[in-house]
Amino acid sequence: MEKVKTIAVNVAAIALISVALFWGNALYRQYVQFEKGEKGTASGDFPAAVAGYEAAIHMYTPGSSIVPRSAQKLWDLGQMAEANHDTARALIAYRALRSSFYAVAGIYSPGQEWIKRCDARIAALVPPSAKATGGTAP
């Protein structure tokens, strides 16, 4: 019986260490991707900024501060594009934000508030004729 307890404790320890390593790796990769988004934003490289922030959200881990910061950065990119009357880029940013949270949904679906906000902005930016035909607006 003592041998079974020892094996169970070892298995539990290995499982906890594995989860901690996986979580730590995901957090590190989130940070790296967020920094790529920041560099893209700083250099005016819109596609790189969107890709970096989007990838950071795709590596969702509960409790991470990077995910909400990345979401806010994507939202801000969409807002700036709208302010510059660049509908295409605004749609790219909003759709990237929305799809990032759809991609990480599982038992728990984070980012529902962001999804609703993006849906509203996308609906406002896509003309009714494009909605009716299933096409996309510029």
Image (spheres, rainbow, N blue to C red):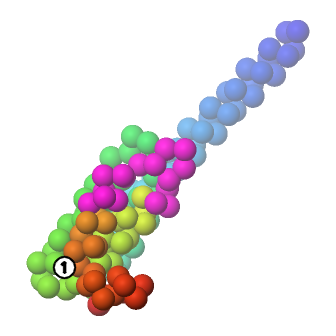
Residue 4 percent location from the top left of the image: 85, 16
Residue 16 percent location from the top left of the image: 62, 32
- What count of labels does the image hold? 1
Residue shown at 73% from the left, 20% from the top = 9
Crowdedness near tag 1: few (<14), some (14–19) or many (≥20) residues, C-alpha within 10 Å: some
Q: Is residue 135 magenta?
A: no
- Amino acid bearing label 1: Ala
* Furthest residue toward left: 83
Q: Is residue 104 magenta?
A: yes
Residue stretch in magenta: 102-117
Q: Is residue 107 visible?
A: yes
The N terminus, quarter of image: top right
Residue shown at 37% from the left, 52% from the top = 111
* Left or right of 86 in this view: 34: right
- Callout 1: helix, strand or loop? helix
Residue shown at 43% from the left, 63% from the top = 100
* Left or right of 53 in this view: 106: right
Residue 56 percent location from the top left of the image: 41, 60
Front residue of 110/117: it is 117
* Furthest residue toward top: 1
The C terminus, quarter of image: bottom left
Q: Is residue 78 visible?
A: no
In the figure, residue 37 lies in which quadrant? bottom left
Name the residue that disc number 1 marks. 81
In the figure, residue 117 lies in which quadrant? bottom left
Q: Is residue 19 above or below residue 94?
A: above
Residue 49 percent location from the top left of the image: 31, 73
Front residue of 45/95: it is 95
Q: Is residue 133 above or below residue 93?
A: below
Residue shown at 33% from the left, 87% from the top = 130
Q: Is residue 79 above or below residue 63?
A: below
In the figure, residue 91 lies in which quadrant? bottom left
